[in-house]
Image (cartoon, rainbow, N blue to C red):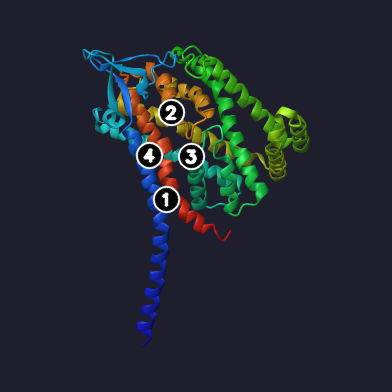
Amino acid sequence: MEEPRATADEQEQRFRRDLRMRKLLLPVLLGLLAAGWLLYRDLQKVRFEEAADERGGYTWVDRNGNNLPDLGDPAEFVATEDGSGKYRRMTAREVLGSIDWTWASTWWIVLAVIFTAFRDLGYIYRIRTLTDKHLGWRQGFDTIMLWEFASSLTPSVVGGSGIAMFIVSREGIPLGRSTAVVLVTALMDELFYVFTVPLVFLFVGMDSLFPPQLDNAFWGLPIKTIFWIGYAFILAMVASVFYAIFFRPRAFKYLLLQVFRLRFLRRWRPMVLKVGDDIVLASDELRGKRAGFWGRAFGATCFSWASRFLVVNCIAAAFFPVSDHLLLYARQLIMWVILLISPTPGSSGVAEVAFAGFFRDLFPVVGYIGAVAIVWRLLSYYLYLFMGVVILPRWLRRTSAG
């Protein structure tokens, strides 16, 4: 009689597990449907590609006055009566379908996926290092995927850092340490950029880094001006946060509060007060860390960002022979400033215009820009939307006790 009772108990446990799984699958399914709909919508978006025979049926009119064809804006193109015209109207899906696919193309795309995985692996290793391995590999993976998910849903100027503090602290990391982890992560990302740009100027030179067709394309400013404004801002931010965390955190907090006493800045004072508190907490957590700790964390940062930029090189090589991989790689560093200050979620819209402008002269066929940009967005944006909606419900359940 014992055996049937044991079987009944097992069936009851399985039933409860299945019931919980059904509750879990519903939000996952809804999230996947939403992400899938966004992807489908973008693949159906109309874009314009240059016609090799100049019989595309559309001509470009510079309605926004930026001297740059916005290939994703139908308002910038007008149909011709005789069927002539330098541009043809296509959906993003049709652009991908027009590419001649080869086995070499497949291997390059596989390599792009591998570098995307390397990027995330570096981030996971870094966050495990910064938390003194309090997070396991599974926890690190969930944290990074959700962090990227949050970044995809928020404007680049906001980023996912605020949500990241919540994610890290929910994994059982005390508030002071979670604040330190997020601040140092942002600091190291900017440090990589600060150190890499001079190397790019040394090995590539400045003349070929700034496409002239992008002048006045963003906010009516020359592209060099935007870059130097962005680089100066990053440099000032890195210097300020570094000094505040490692030397005078309380003095820095006091200075911030005094500056934001000014009448026209007063409404942001509560936010600045929180920033000052975060700096003090981070400083208390990070002082006294050894050189090996910083070396491992910054090494992982460099590994991640180097892999991140190599993704575009691999995608481009899948469609055509790349004549200058170094220049293609270096242009991405310059483009990153534009994406960093973008006001749209995931830099959507701005990313596509910047991508076309920065790489237009490096692609042998302009039509490849659309295909490369679409695959790039799949790996850098939509991938994390899908990963996020799958991981989030289970992660919330797993961390609910904490």
Q: CA distance from mark 2 to mark 1?
A: 25 Å
Residue 317 showing in the rendered view: no
Residue 204 placed where, x, y %? Answer: 48, 16
Q: Is residue 327 above or below residue 159?
A: above
Q: Secondary structure at mark 3?
A: helix
Name which of mark 1 and mark 4 comes first in the sequence: 4
Residue 244 placed where, x, y %? Answer: 72, 34
Residue 183 placed where, x, y %? Answer: 63, 39
| Residue at horizontal 71 percent and vertical 36 percent from the top | 269
Q: Quadrant of the N terminus?
A: bottom left
Q: CA distance from mark 3 to mark 2?
A: 14 Å
Q: Secondary structure at mark 1?
A: helix
Q: Which mark is residue 347?
A: none
Q: Which mark is residue 38?
A: 4
Disc 2 target residue = 349
Q: Secondary structure at mark 4?
A: helix
